[in-house]
Image (tube, helix red, strand yellow):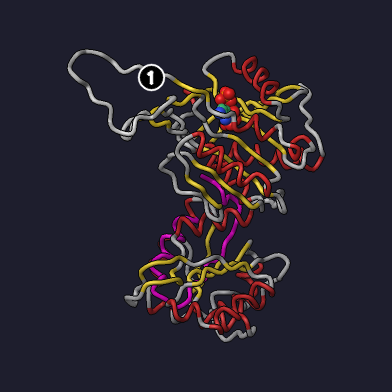
Amino acid sequence: MNELAGKHIVLGLTGGIACYKAAELCRALIKADATVQVVMTAAAEQFITAVTLQALSNRPVYDSQWDSREPNNMPHINLSREADAILIAPCSADFMAKLLHGRADDLLSLMCLARPLEKVPLLIAPAMNREMWSHPATQRNLIQLQADGATVFGVGHGDQACGETGDGRMLEAQELLEEVVAFFQPKILLGQHVLITAGPTYEAIDPVRGITNRSSGKMGFALARAAREAGAEVTLVAGPVSLAEPRGVRRFDVRSALEMAQAVEGAVPAATVFIATAAVADWRPALAADKKMKKDGSGRVPELSFVENPDILAGVAKSPRARSRQLYCVGFAAESHDLLTNAQEKLLRKDVPLLVANIGPETFGRDDNALLLVDAHGTQDLGRDSKINLARKLIAEIASRLKAGEPKNEN
Ligand code: C5P
C-alpha cells in the first residue's frame, strides 16, 4: 500500500528499549512509500545502532548538530525544512520534558525547536516505564506538549522490559503506521459521530450450532477506520468476526441480530451518521434448543421453523432524527445478480438517502471490492479498489453530502 507516498518523515529515536521497535517502524513507513530520514540521540545509540537504521532507511543517519556533511553545517535547519512531519518514536520521558522547555542541546531537540511550526507537525510516540508514564510531571508535560501543537499518540499496556506491567509501552509499529496515515487524512468528518454495523450475525439453533453467513466484516471495519481517520468519533457494532478493530474506535461485539439491534438502539441517540454494512440474518430459528439436538438413529431430521429478525437499518431510518436528517443513514446491499435493480428496490424499501451496492460472492472475505452508489437521483460507480481506499472514497462522499445538505447523483 502506498498510503504515505510523497511524504518525507524525519524519524527521531531517543533513548529507550523501544528503539528495537523503531527499526520495524522505519521499515513500515518505507513500505508505505514514505521517505525516511533517521535522526538519533546519543542515548538511542545505546540501544540500537545507526547502521541498522541506515540500512532500513537507505539514508545516512544523523546524530549530531555538528555534522559537517551539510555544506552550511546546519543539519537542524536543512533536515527540518524538507520534512512533512517529525515523528519521535520512541520518545522518552526525558525527551518529552526537554521538548516542553524548548531545550535544544542535541540535533533532534534542536530540529524540533527550529522546525516551522505551521508546516512541520511534531508527532510523539511515548515509551517508558509505567511509573514514569503516570508521574504527574510526565502527564503535565504531555498536556502542555499537546497545547503547544504536538500530536501525542497513546501508549500500549502490558509487560514492560523492566519486568513490571502497566501503561507506557510504545505502540507497535503497525499501530504507529496507522496513526501516521490517519494524521495525514483530511479531517472532513470532524464533529460527526459515525455508527457502523459490520460482519455477519449468528443465529443459534442449539448451544453448538447456528446459522451465519460469509461476511468477514472487512468492509465495515475499513469504514470505521476511514471515518476515524476523517476525525469522526466512531462506534462499531461487530458481529462474530476475527478482525482487530481500527485504532481509536469504540467497539461492541454482538452475536445475533437481536443483540445487534439492541446495541445499535443504545448507540443511535449519539450518532449523526449510521452506516449499516452488517450482513444481518433475515431469519432466526423460532426457538433455539437449550441442549444440543441429537441424532437418534431413526433417520428423522429436526424441523426448524423461523421468525423474521428486525430490520435494524429500516428501523433506524424511520426514527425522527433520521427523518429530520440529524442522522444520515447509509445502507449496503450485497447481491448475487441484478445489482442495480435490487439496490434501487432496497433504497426505497429501507427509505435511506444512500445505498451502496456490491456483489456478495465477489466481496466476502476479500481485501478488495467494487462499489456502486445508488440514490434517488442516479448512480455513481466507485470502481474496484482495496476496501480501505473504497472506504475513504465513501466517507468523502458522505462528508460532501452532509456538507451540501443533500444527495447529488445525476447519472
Ligand atoms: O434486506 P437486506 O438484508 O438485503 O438489506 C441490506 C441492508 O440492510 C444492509 O445495510 C444491512 O446492514 C441492513 N439490514 C439490517 N437489518 C436486517 C437486515 C438488513 O440492518 N435485519
Kind of residue sitting beneath label 1: Leu
> Callout 1 environment at 10 Å: few (<14), some (14 to 19), or many (20+)?
few
Name the residue beneath numbered marker 1: 304
Residue 269 visible to an observer of this rendering: yes
Query: Per the image, is 16 magenta?
Result: yes
The residue drawn where x is 64% and y is 17% is 340
Is 194 drawn above or below residue 18 in the view shown? above
Residue 87 vs 102, above or below: the answer is above
The spot of residue 69 in percent (x, y) is 54, 75
Using the rendered view, name the quadrant where residue 195 is placed: top right
**Residue 370 at least partly seen:** no
Q: In the image, is residue 111 above or below residue 153?
A: below
Q: Position of residue 85 (x, y in %)?
A: 61, 64
Q: Nearer the viewer, residue 178 or 342?
A: 342
Q: Which residues are magenta?
A: 1-29
* Rendered-image quarter of ligand 1: top right
Dividing the image into 4 quarters, which one contains the C terminus?
top right
In the displayed structure image, the side of residue 396 where residue 163 appears, left or right: left
Instruction: Name the residue: 56% across, 77% down.
Output: 108
